[in-house]
Each structure stands twice: as structure tokens, then as C-alpha cells.
Image (cartoon, rainbow, N blue to C red):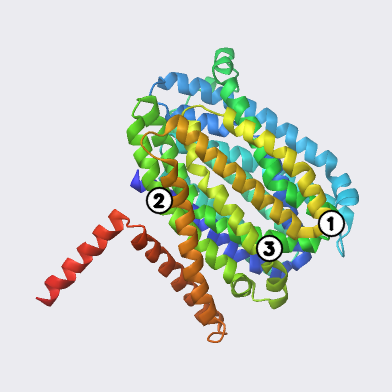
């Protein structure tokens, strides 16, 4: 499992690193309004991904099950794949048909013409459709616990799609060329990943390749898949509605600034997503074998470490928001405009991240009703809340609604999952020791570093190193004050080694 976690970390690290490396270059070569259009297309991609219908999660879960025969897994794979292709075709057609309305009636454009933006949306509809299919195949590899292979392919796709395009747009600074490149490379990698997955499954005959839908498979998985669809639908609305309404009521440049803060905050997901991808099959395996206590201990240990790291990063994103954005983009005006959103959005992503492992436990047990109930209930806040907050308070209003809703959902979600599936872990341990204390320690530690930095540093490189030091110190202080046994044991081991060297 450790190798899989490392592989997933590298894969997710590359994804986050891509944002840091390439977004400033996209802005430099294409302009900030073009980057804002790119941001809006990512919202479209997220809306399309909602219609995944839970099929990727279903495939990953079925491949990870220890109580299912291999031939049964193959039948489920072909059925899910066929359903997925039908859904993606429908989505591509929908995006293509609605592109004119989106560009003419929805977006508040400045220099770009609606006809051009309509063309861009048509292109990305194909690209994101194939990206969904590609992630479906990657989900299959993850379920087979082939995370190393999956992440190699994902990193390769990211390098060609997001890195090499920089050389293309530096020569031809055209947004249409940008979207065409990303679409073509995605289609190419989709077929490569499909080939790798089916080689692992040993599918060779012509009958194995033909699309098919097995009725008995549909009967077995439809409840779980439908539950996942509802989860995706509600989560998608909660995560994207702020950006959808910003694109409607405010200028496209405001959406760009808001999305910059979101992109930076996604660094927090890098802490949990690699571990989540590796540990979901393990949770599934443990719970299907009835090893509940072992699963609970594993959850508690992982959650302790990740919460400390998450709050340390969040505190620094909050206090050093403008400095970090300037280090990243090199543009003081862009940094100033986006920095007002970063403290609120980073808190939202911490709470979102803290819900990932309880969510994994729920999925491992096939328990989707809680996510649906919470998500549907939250819509009573988000639908009117985002509308009114965005219309009257702009991007700050949208960010505040996002933070409030995500915090409430996470607190309730942890409470229910703890009572239902976790044994021997008190809520006091989770809420107080693993959430509140790391938060307070990180805020106090980082504030001290912030006060010192006000009169010391102006150089971007030195400031980056200083912020990295601040994050590291916050993590170490939290580990020591919370008496993390593994960390203390590690320090004692280092101390003994140093003493032996002196002798």
C-alpha cells in the first residue's frame, strides 16, 4: 500500500505542480481574459463529470472487492463501459448544441467575441468527453491496485497535454490552438489507457471488445451507481454553483481571479487525494472481510497526520495570500485581486479534504444515502445562498457561502460515519484533537511568522522559502504538542543516532 500511496502522491503532486508551473504561462502568452475562458471551460468539465453517474467509482469498487469472481468483474466492466460511452456521447452533443447560448447569453465577455468562444466550447466538449472516459479506465486500474501504472500514464498525459502546449502557444498564442492541442492529446491517451487496462484484464478476443450490457449486472449495481450519481450531482452543484453564478452576474475577469484562488487552494487536496486513491481499495477489502477495528485504527492514524498538514498549509495560504499569489503569477494586480478570496476558499477546501476519508469508508461499505441526504439538504442553503450572495456581494459572498456549507456538511458527515462504521474512536478525538487543536496551533504559529515577515522580505524566492519554513514549523509544533507517538519515536531515534556519532 505504501508504494501505491507514493505513486498516487507523485501523480497528484504533478497535477498540482502543473497549476503552479503552467497557469502563469497561460496568462503570459494568452492574456488574463483568455485564462478566464479556460477557467470557465473547467466549470463545464466539472458539470459534465457529474454525469459520470457513479460508474467510475462503481468500477473501482467492484475491481477492489475480494468477494467477487474475476469473470464477474469482467462482465461488470463491459457493461459499465458501454453505459459510459452512451452517457459521454449524449454530453458531447448537449455541449455542442448549447455552446451558442452559453457564449451569447450567459458570459459577460470583454474583448473576445461570442462566436469565437462558442467554437472553443464545442472543441472542449469533445476533449472533456474523452477525458471522462479516460478517467473511467484509470478508475479501473486504481481498483485493481495498479496505482503505479495508472499514475505513470496520468503524469505522461499531463506532461504532453499541459506542459508541451506551452511551447505551442508561445509560438502560436491562440486560444483555439490551445484547446485543440489539449483535446487531441486527451483522445490519444484515452485509447492508450484503455489498451493498458484491458491488457491487465487479459481481454483479447473480438467478443471481449464488443460493447454489451448485461441485465443481471445492471440489477446488481444500479442502486450503488444511482446513489453515486446523486452524490456527484449534489456535490457538483455545491462545488460549481459559485463559479456558474459568478460567470453570469460578474465579469469574466472576476471569474478568473476567483478561479486562481480555487486553483491554489486545490493544493490542499494533494495531501489527501493520493492517500485516498490508495486507501479506498484497502478500506473496501477490510470491510468486506469484517475487519472493522483494523479499518478504524487505519482511519484514525491517517486522519491525524493529514489534518495537521492541511491546517498548516491553510494558515499560510490565508496570512500570506497576496505574497503567494504574487510569487506564483509575478503580477501584483492579479495577486491583489485574487488574494481577497484565498483565505475563505482555502478553509473551504480544508473542510472538503477532511470529509474525504469518511467518504471513503462510506463507499467501501456501499453506503451512499448519507451523502445524498446531506447534499440535498444543503441545496436549500446553496441555491438561494449563492444566488443572493453573488448578486449582491460578488465573489466574496459566493466564497463565504461555499465555506459555511462545506464546514457544516463535513462536521455532520464525520459524526454519522463515526457512529455507524468506526469502532473505538471518540468524536472528541476527531473534532477536538484532530481538527480544532491543529487549526489553532497553525493559526498562532503562522501569525507569528507573518508579523516577522512584514518588515523583512521583498524578494520572491526568499519569501517562498520563508513560507515553506512557516508551514514546516507549524507541522512540527502540532506534532509535538499533540504528542504524536510516531513522530516522537522518530525524533528519539534521530537523537540516539546523533549521540552515537558524538561518542
**x, y percentage for residue 151?**
47, 48
From the image, tell me which residue sits under label 1: 392
The quadrant of the image that shows the N terminus is top left
From the image, tell me which residue sits under label 2: 304
Task: Identify which residue, 251 or 309, lies in the foreground.
Answer: 309
Residue that lies at the very extreme toward the bottom in this rendered image: 455
Left or right, 156 with respect to 98, comes to: left
Q: Answer whether labels 3 and 1 touch (C-beta < 8 Å).
A: no
**SS at mark 2 in the image:** helix
**x, y percentage for residue 290?**
35, 25
**Alpha carbon distance from label 1 to label 2:** 39 Å
**Alpha carbon distance from label 3 to label 2:** 27 Å
Mark 1 and mark 2 lie on one chain; the one further toward the N terminus is 2
Other residues around mark 2 within 10 Å, as few (<14) / some (14–19) / many (≥20) = some
Other residues around mark 1 within 10 Å, as few (<14) / some (14–19) / many (≥20) = few
Residue that lies at the very extreme toward the right in this rendered image: 105
Please say if 46 is above or below 202. below
| Residue 20 visible within the image | yes
Q: Answer whether labels 1 and 2 touch (C-beta < 8 Å).
A: no
**Tag shown at residue 455:** none
**x, y percentage for residue 425?**
38, 39
| Residue positioned 57% across, 82% down in the render | 454
Please say if 226 is above or below 460. above
Task: Identify which residue, 326 or 208, lies in the foreground.
Answer: 326
**Tag shown at residue 341:** 3
Amino acid at each position: 500500500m505504501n508504494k501505491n500511496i507514493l505513486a498516487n502522491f507523485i501523480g497528484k503532486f504533478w497535477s498540482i505542480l502543473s497549476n503552479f508551473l503552467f497557469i502563469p504561462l497561460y496568462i503570459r502568452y494568452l492574456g488574463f481574459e483568455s485564462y478566464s475562458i479556460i477557467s470557465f471551460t473547467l466549470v463545464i468539465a466539472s458539470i459534465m463529470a457529474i454525469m459520470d453517474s457513479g460508474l467510475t467509482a462503481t468500477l473501482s469498487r467492484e475491481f477492489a472487492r475480494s468477494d467477487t469472481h474475476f469473470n464477474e468483474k469482467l462482465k461488470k466492466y463491459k457493461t459499465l463501459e458501454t453505459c459510459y460511452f452512451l452517457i459521454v456521447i449524449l454530453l458531447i452533443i448537449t455541449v455542442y448544441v448549447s455552446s451558442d447560448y452559453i457564449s451569447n447569453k450567459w458570459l459577460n465577455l470583454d474583448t473576445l467575441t461570442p462566436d469565437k468562444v462558442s467554437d472553443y466550447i464545442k472543441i472542449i466538449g469533445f476533449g472533456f468527453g474523452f477525458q471522462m472516459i479516460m478517467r473511467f479506465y484509470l478508475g479501473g486500474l486504481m481498483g485493481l491496485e495498479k496505482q503505479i501504472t495508472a499514475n505513470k500514464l496520468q503524469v505522461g498525459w499531463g506532461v504532453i497535454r499541459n506542459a508541451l502546449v506551452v511551447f505551442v502557444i508561445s509560438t502560436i498564442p491562440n486560444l483555439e490552438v490551445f484547446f485543440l492541442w489539449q483535446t487531441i492529446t486527451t483522445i490519444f491517451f484515452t485509447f492508450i489507457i484503455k489498451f493498458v487496462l484491458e491488457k491487465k484484464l487479459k481481454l483479447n478476443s473480438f467478443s471481449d471488445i464488443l460493447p454489451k450490457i448485461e441485465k443481471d449486472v445492471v440489477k446488481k449495481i444500479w442502486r450503488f451507481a444511482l446513489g453515486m450519481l446523486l452524490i456527484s450531482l449534489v456535490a457538483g452543484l455545491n462545488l460549481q454553483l459559485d463559479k456558474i453564478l459568478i460567470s453570469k452576474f460578474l465579469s469574466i475577469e472576476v471569474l478568473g481571479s476567483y478561479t486562481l484562488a480555487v486553483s491554489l487552494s486545490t493544493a490542499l487536496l494533494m495531501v489527501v487525494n493520493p492517500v485516498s486513491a490508495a486507501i479506498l481499495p484497502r478500506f473496501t477489502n477490510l470491510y468486506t472481510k469484517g475487519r472493522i477495528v483494523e479499518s478504524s485504527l487505519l482511519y484514525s492514524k491517517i486522519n491525524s497526520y493529514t489534518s495537521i498538514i492541511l491546517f498548516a498549509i491553510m494558515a499560510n495560504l490565508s496570512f500570506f495570500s497576496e505574497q503567494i499569489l504574487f510569487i506564483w503569477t509575478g503580477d501584483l494586480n492579479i495577486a491583489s485581486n485574487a488574494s481577497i478570496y484565498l483565505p475563505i476558499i482555502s478553509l473551504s477546501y480544508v473542510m472538503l479534504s477532511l470529509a474525504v476519508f469518511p467518504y471513503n469508508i462510506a463507499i467501501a461499505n456501499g453506503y451512499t444515502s448519507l451523502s445524498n441526504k446531506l447534499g440535498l439538504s444543503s441545496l436549500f442553503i446553496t441555491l438561494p445562498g449563492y444566488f443572493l450572495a453573488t448578486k449582491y456581494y460578488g465573489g466574496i459572498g459566493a466564497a463565504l457561502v461555499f465555506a459555511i456549507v462545506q464546514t457544516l456538511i463535513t462536521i455532520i458527515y464525520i459524526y454519522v460515519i463515526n457512529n455507524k462504521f468506526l469502532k473505538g474512536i471518540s468524536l472528541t478525538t476527531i473534532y477536538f484533537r484532530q481538527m480544532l487543536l491543529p487549526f489553532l496551533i497553525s493559526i498562532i504559529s503562522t501569525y507569528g511568522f507573518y508579523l516577522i515577515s512584514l518588515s523583512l522580505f521583498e524578494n520572491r524566492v526568499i519569501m517562498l522559502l520563508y513560507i515553506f519554513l512557516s508551514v514546516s514549523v507549524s507541522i512540527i509544533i502540532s506534532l509535538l504538542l499533540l504528542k504524536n507517538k510516531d513522530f516522537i519515536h522518530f525524533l528519539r531515534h534521530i537523537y540516539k543516532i546523533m549521540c552515537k556519532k558524538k561518542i
